[in-house]
Every structure is written in C-alpha cells, then in structure tokens.
Image (cartoon, rainbow, N blue to C red):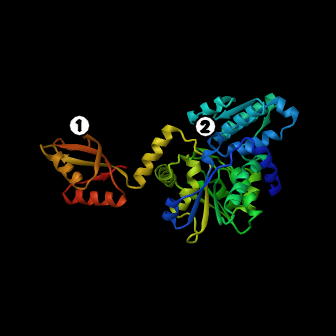
Amino acid sequence: MLELSDVLDARVRVEETARRTPLDYSHTFSAMTGAEVHLKLETFQRTGSFKIRGATNRIETLTDEERTAGVVTASAGNHAQGVALAATRSGVDSTIVMPDHAPISKVKATRNYGATVELFGDDYDEAAERAHDIEREEGRTYVHAFDDEMVMAGQGTIGLEILEDLPEVETVIVPIGGGGLIAGVATAVKQQKPDARVIGVQAEGASSAAQSLAKGEVHTLDSVDTIADGIATRSVGERTFEVIEERVDEVVTVSDSEIAVAVTHLLERAKTMVEGAGAVPLAALLSGAIEYEEDEVVVPVLSGGNIDMNTLTTVIMRGLVETGRYVKLRTVLKDRPGALDDLLDVISGQQANIYGIQHDRTSRDIAMNAAEVELDLETRGNDHVEELLAALREEGFDVEVLA
C-alpha cells in the first residue's frame, strides 16, 4: 500500500514542474460556516489542476525503454492536460483519449500542451477502454488517472504542503472521482497527524466511493450524471479504495445544486473560478453534509479551475436560482389594456429587477381572452422571492415558479 515515504520521494520529482499552491484563509466562508476555513487553491496550479503532480511523478519514474515508446492515457480533461505537459517537458510522446463530450476548452488545452488527442466514447470509462487498446497496439505505457501508486504519491504532495503551511489543521476535505487525490492526501496527512480528519466528497450522480464503502468492495456504477465532470467516474480504483478504506474518515455526497451554489459563492466572494469537481469540498461544508465543531480548522482542497465557459454559464444560473438571486415566473392575465401594467406595478413595488418578459396570446393552453406571461427577474435572496410571490398572489395573480 502507498506509504508516506512514497509521497516524500515524489515531492523531489514533482517540485520542478508543479507549483506550491497557496493556502488562503477565507473570512467569508469562515463567517458563513462557523469553522476556520483555509482554501487550498490548486486552481492556481500549472494546467489549472492538481493532476500535474501525479502525472509528473509517474512519468519521471519511467524506464528509458518506456520513455522511448511513449505514454497513453484516458481523461475527461485535467489528467489529460497534466500528462500532456509532464510528458512534453520530459521529451516523452503522449497520446490522450478523451470522451466525445469532453469540454472543448480542455481538449484544446491538452493539444496545446503537446499531446495527440483522440476523442472516443460517452464517458471516461469508454475512453479508457480505447486507451488500453492503444497501449497494447503501440507498446505505450498507460498512465492511469488515479489507480497507480506513483500517481497517488504525486497527488499526496498537496497533503505535505497543507501540514507544513497549517500544522494545526483538524479536517481536510477532498474531492473523490477515482480516488487518486484523496488516497495521496490521506496518506500524507494521516501518517503525520493521525488525529486529523480526512473527509472525501463525491457528487450524488457519481457516488461510487460512498457505495463501495457501504458494500465493503469496489462498486461500479452503471452510469454517472453530474455537472462535476472532473469526478464523473463509474468507480474508484482497486488500489485507491484500499487506501480510502484504511485512511479516510468519512465520504459524503453533494447535489449538483449544492455544487452550483459553491461555484457561484467562490466566484462572487473569493474571486476564484473553480470547476464543479473542485468545488465539492466547499459545497459539502456549506450544505451541512459534514459535521464540525465551532472554529474547527478546516481545509477544503479546491482541486481545479478548468471549467468550460458554456458549463459555467449554466452553473452560475443554477447557483443564482438556488440562492434566490434569479427567479423565472409564469402567470396568465386577462387580455385587456392595463393588465400587464398591473402586474409590473406589483413587481416594481417589491423592488425586483426585470431581465426579460415574454407575452404570448397564442398559446393553446390558455383561454382565447387571456395572455400568458413569463418573466425573468433579478431578486435579492430567497426571502425576497417569497415576499414577491406573496405580494403577487395577494393581488390575485396565479403565479407559477418555473426556475
């Protein structure tokens, strides 16, 4: 099993390529949670993700023969970029298989780092099958995204940095996809400070680790469905699961809505862009999925910031809806002069800002003498939304909340 000595050895190989990332105390999230929250900002890492650490350690341990043959891997995006950059810096040829629907920003970045990219399959697991075919056909070394001890050891250097920068840390919260990151971090933290907690977080739509722990063996999901594409794997690794079972204190899950809220808060309050997978530790803390004491020293590991711009737009809108900053309403008015003005008077009286209005007399779902109205409104929070809805209903408007 992975040991602390492996992580300490990895630090020497990794430090020339990977950056030592900041550990930033957050007044905002400390006030919101009652804990003492320090954010480990792997969003500032080279390639925008922690994956460069494990990829570098693995490639630096290749034999001369393996370096000549080149490497291959599969990835939804962050591991792809890490392997591409680490291989290029070491003069090793790399081929990366990415799912057909991988974010275009991650595909472009991987190619820019020097890799040959092939798109294949609906998700990571199908892409991995194709990458293993290439491994056999071309004699390349497969650099696993997580189920490799050298990869785990490289990721564990994050744990070393956390303990060095914040020796009083009590809880470290880590995302889990395949488990490589948490296996490395848990090894680095628990073997130096056994009383510190290491808690893993998964998206509800990709909760293989949580289900595996419940069953006592690796459980493979039939499919995954989450906005957190960086941790959208059907199962944890065999090697990573052994470490998780022994060294991780708890694994919790969060919903996509809770992830969206965390991403939105990080953008607005911490001025930090974090992808869904990187935001799950903070989502778990904000949503109450994790129990902690008042003023407990907590480090959420924000593992990456490579979010696709189209995805970011969707996530922000979901976050605004969940926090009551945006609401979409539908109502039906009598089709007569002044009816719309009456509706708008109530809305303006409640100090809601109108983004857009759609007024439709032609819908087959309403009476001939009626008009359907949909409104996009900017609001100031969930309490404000409730006040607005109460005022509209008090004035006789039958209002339906669409979003």
> At numbered mark 1, what does the secondary structure look like: helix, strand or loop?
loop
- Residue 320 appears left or right of 58: left
- Residue name at image x 87 percent, y 32 percent: 65
**Residue 129 visible from this viewpoint:** no
Instruction: Residue 317: give x, y in percent of width and height.
Output: 42, 46
Instruction: Residue 43: give x, y in percent of width and height.
Output: 60, 46
When the figure is inspected, residue 218 is found, relative to residue 30, above or below; the finding is above
When the figure is inspected, residue 195 is found, relative to residue 221, above or below; the finding is below
Instruction: Residue 191: give x, y in percent of width and height.
Output: 77, 62
Q: Amino acid at mark 1?
A: Thr
Q: Which mark is residue 122?
A: 2
- Looking at the image, tell me whether mark 2 or mark 1 is earlier in sequence order: 2
When the figure is inspected, residue 241 is found, relative to residue 77, above or below; the finding is below
Name the residue nearer the viewer: 233 or 105: 105
Give the residue at mark 1. Answer: 362
- Residue 337 appears left or right of 365: left
